[in-house]
Image (cartoon, rainbow, N blue to C red):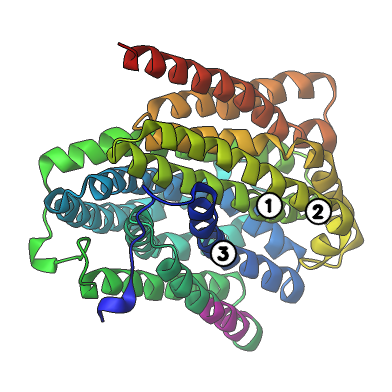
Amino acid sequence: MAGLSKSTDMTHGSIWKHLALFAVPLLLGNLFQQLYNTVDSIVLGNFVGKSALAAIGCTTFICNTLVNFFNGISIGAGIIISTHFGRRDWDKLHETVETAVLTAIVVGALVSLLSVPFVPFMLRAISTPEETMGPASAYLRIYFLGTIFLFCYNIGSAILRAVGDTRTPLKILILTSILNILMDLLFVVAFQWGIAGAAAATVVSEAISAFLSLAVLHLSSESFRLTWQDLRFKPDILKSILLLGMPVGIQQALTSFSNAFVQSYINSFNSTSIMAGWSVYLKLDQFSLLPVMSIGQATTTFVSQNLGGGDPGRARKGTRTSIVLGSCVVIGIALVLGTFAKSLVSLFNQDPEVIYYGTQFVWMTLPFRFFGVWNQTFAGALRGAGDTRGPMLIMLFSFVFCRQAYLFIVTRFVKNIYTVGLGYPFGWVMCTFLSLFYYCWKQRRFDAQSRP
């Protein structure tokens, strides 16, 4: 069983090759992970109707707010593990793994227990129409019961990726994504459980992925092996994880929370077709951002390993290489989205109005895709260097304050799908310029401190 997982040392060898080989499995894994909710949307949109598709759209940001908060904690743990791996500090690496896994179990259980009673309040807070309130509530209640499994998988995969292993999480996600598709068809189409069946399929798949990822860690013979009898909180390590992870988690959670208010603007049109079209756009948007996010995550691991190994110059070269790779990928994504927008939207629902609105949302945001490369790469590099607060403040200011200010002001004068839909890219543009300025300032400051 020792061959279940294998780490990768990024402190030597070709930079672009390390980044590409790390990012590609990571991208495929993120794609398969995204398939969970996307398959739910496709099955519900085609076999239940656009009202169910609209209900799924209403739940997206609520789910992401809680889940993304713990994702930030996972990133914090990954940074520490990557640094210890680069330093060859195996004792600290082992203690960090045990603390991180126990944190996932405890926090995941608490979220599962505490979030279910607040489902109606969450949906009313984003002006969810009554016709979609029932289905959306059913989906969320079941989904939240399974967050402990999602958290455990996320921390398990974060540990593996931190030591350079992206293939094992990918294999797990491929398997569980296929199972999720089969269970969606079984529960929704064959058993006719509706939106509750889609949620149940997701939870069961996530439970299997959590079990497999933790089993791989336990059965591994490498330095990051999970030993259940050593599972305990190490106060100093937990503090370090939280200091690095909390800013990322807060930023991602508040960004998702802010996006829920964007959803409230969409809901205020009182059109199921617009809501369903927006829901489809969100799914396509999430898929299109995954390659850039994967490169950003690869940058985090690359930078943290090389800084841990004492080579800041190589870390900076890795950041520049990531920007070039990401730019090439975004050009390809833009061409695909621009050419096949209608066909992609129609996969989710055949209603002409849904196709029209979904396509409009895709096209209006297309020219701004390039800005995501800079956002994610600079944020990934800064996090890898141990600076998680800077990216947090920049993204909160751009994605929360600026985006909400834009929507509040612009819709007072002109309120239509275009002014609301452009709220997303407005935040991207602001984040790009601020991230570029901050990264250059941090680099000049580091170079000045390094000179004798």
Marks 2 and 3: in contact by CB < 8 Å? Answer: no
CA separation, marks 3 and 2? 18 Å
> Upstream in the sequence, badge 2 or badge 1?
1
Residue 48 percent location from the top left of the image: 72, 73
Q: Residues within 10 Å of mark 1 (few under 14, many from 20)?
A: some
Q: Is residue 430 in view?
A: yes
Residue located 75% across and 69% down the image: 49
Q: Residue at x 56, y 64 (%)?
A: 28
Going by the numbered disc 1, the residue's amino acid type is Ser
Looking at the rendered structure, which numbered label has been put on residue 288?
1
Disc 3 + disc 1, Cβ < 8 Å: no
**Disc 2 target residue:** 337
Disc 3 crowd, CA 10 A, few/some/many (<14, 14-19, 20+)? many
| Of residues 307 and 232, the one drawn nearer to the viewer in this rendering | 307
Residue 120 x/y as whole percent: 50, 50
In the rendered image, which quarter contains the C terminus? Answer: top left
Label 2, secondary structure: give it: helix
Q: Amino acid at mark 2?
A: Leu
Residue 195 found in image quarter? bottom right
Q: Is there a contact, CB below 8 Å, between mark 2 and mark 1?
A: yes
Find disc 3 in the rendering and name its residue.
28
Please say whether residue 216 is one of the residues in the magenta stretch: no
Disc 2 to disc 1, C-alpha distance:
8 Å
- Looking at the rendered structure, the kind of residue marked 3 is Leu
Q: Is residue 410 left or right of residue 160?
A: right
Residue drawn at 47 percent across, 32 percent down: 316
Q: Which mark lies nearer to you, 3 or 1?
A: 3
State the extent of the magenta-drawn residues as a range.
Answer: 178-188
